[in-house]
């Protein structure tokens, strides 16, 4: 995960430890220790000052990224934490667990400020709309569901993919959602109506991650088939791509909307730049 302030630093997990890396030198800047089981998910506040991690130890932790200190341990879930997202103002986090609950947390105080119940499926990913009012959940049954965070009520369900939803992201204007699935496809949704606008085909294996560029015009997806693909969200056309030497497990787009850092499952990193001619290795 690339830190959002544009510095050459990333946050990765290794079993129960998180590390902050300087990507120019390849040096580990600091270790974040405290979890007692696998770190399963990570989110960073928009100002890049804090990180929230979830774990198989059933807790979340809030970290100060400058000092590496654990500020709060968030307790309440009774099973592994499967997803976490931070609101745009950086003050709240929404977590999902295999205990079939969602919890809202105050990042500053470390207190639980609400719980959402009522779904029986496994929540695999969470995204929060740019206005901070709704959460969009991806599940193991291939569906998306949205929640009204202010009222604590479940909204509509989008019948989505034929496989596990791996990731979901909102466009900056909040009007569209893009979901990625283990069935090898992405779908573009009209968030207000819940209608599927188009299906993006091309990956030959699980699509593991998706992000939208800052201008909202393109989506970038990573797949275990070893590819990064750039999609035009208006036309649904595949416009650029990059093929690594192995499955691409994660990537991040820098604030300039063009610099991409992609990590392979083997531990190899690629520095790419999105040009009109395609993805160029740096």
Image (cartoon, rainbow, N blue to C red):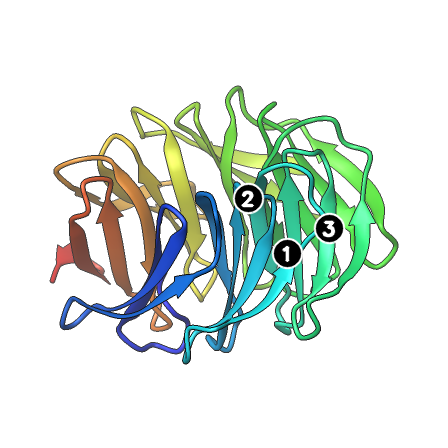
Residue carrying label 3: 103
In whole angstroms, how far apart are the C-alphas of marks 3 and 1? Answer: 13 Å
| Comparing labels 3 and 1, the label whose residue is closer to the camera | 3
- Quadrant position of residue 92: bottom right
Residue that numbered label 1 is attached to? 128
For mark 1, give the secondary structure: strand
| Residue at x 48%, y 53% (from the top left corner) | 35
> For this rendering, which residue is in front, 48 or 173?
48
Circle 1 residues within 10 Å: few <14, some 14–19, many ≥20: many
Residue 242 appears at what percent x and percent y?
Answer: 19, 45
Q: For the point 81% across and 55% down, which residue is it?
A: 114
Q: Earlier in the sequence, mark 2 or mark 3?
A: 2
Marks 2 and 1 close (CB-CB < 8 Å)? no
Residue at x 54%, y 57% (from the top left corner): 171
In front: 177, or 115?
Answer: 115
Q: Do the residues under discs 2 and 3 have CB atoms within 8 angstroms?
A: no
Secondary structure at numbered mark 2: loop
- Residue 149, position in %: x, y? 79, 55
- Secondary element under disc 3, as helix, strand or loop, is strand
Q: CA distance from mark 2 to mark 1?
A: 24 Å
Q: Residues within 10 Å of mark 2 (few under 14, many from 20)?
A: some
Residue to which mark 2 is pinned:
57
Q: Percent from the top left, x then y, of residue 213?
A: 41, 60
Q: Is residue 250 left or right of residue 86?
A: left
Neighbor class of circle 3 (other Cα within 10 Å; few <14, some 14-19, many 20+) is some
Q: Is residue 19 above or below residue 91?
A: above
Q: Position of residue 93 (x, y in %)?
A: 65, 60
């Amino acid at each position: 995960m690339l830190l959002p302030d544009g510095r050459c630093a990333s946050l990765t997990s290794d079993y129960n430890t998180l590390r902050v890396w300087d990507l120019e030198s390849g040096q580990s800047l600091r270790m974040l220790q405290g979890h007692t089981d696998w770190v399963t998910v990570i989110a960073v506040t928009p100002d890049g000052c804090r990180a929230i991690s979830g774990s198989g130890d059933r807790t979340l932790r809030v970290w100060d990224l400058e000092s590496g200190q654990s500020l709060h341990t968030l307790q309440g879930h009774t099973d592994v934490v499967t997803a976490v997202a931070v609101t745009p103002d950086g003050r709240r986090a929404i977590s999902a667990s295999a205990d079939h609950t969602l919890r809202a947390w105050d990042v500053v105080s470390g207190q639980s400020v609400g719980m959402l119940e009522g779904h029986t499926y496994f929540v695999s990913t969470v995204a929060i709309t740019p206005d901070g009012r709704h959460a969009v959940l991806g599940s193991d049954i291939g569906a998306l569901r949205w929640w009204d965070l202010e009222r604590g009520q479940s909204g509509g369900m989008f019948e989505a993919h034929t496989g596990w939803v791996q990731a979901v992201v909102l466009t900056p204007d909040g009007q569209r959602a893009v979901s990625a699935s283990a069935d090898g496809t992405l779908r573009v949704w009209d968030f207000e109506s819940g209608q599927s606008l188009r299906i993006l085909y091309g990956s030959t294996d699980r699509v593991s991650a998706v992000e939208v560029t800052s201008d909202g015009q393109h989506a970038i997806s990573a797949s275990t088939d070893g590819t990064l693909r750039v999609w035009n969200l208006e036309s649904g056309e595949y416009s650029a791509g990059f093929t690594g030497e192995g499955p691409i497990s994660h990537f991040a787009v820098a604030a300039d909307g063009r610099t991409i850092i992609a990590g392979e499952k083997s531990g190899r990193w690629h520095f790419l730049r999105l040009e009109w001619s395609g993805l160029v290795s740096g």
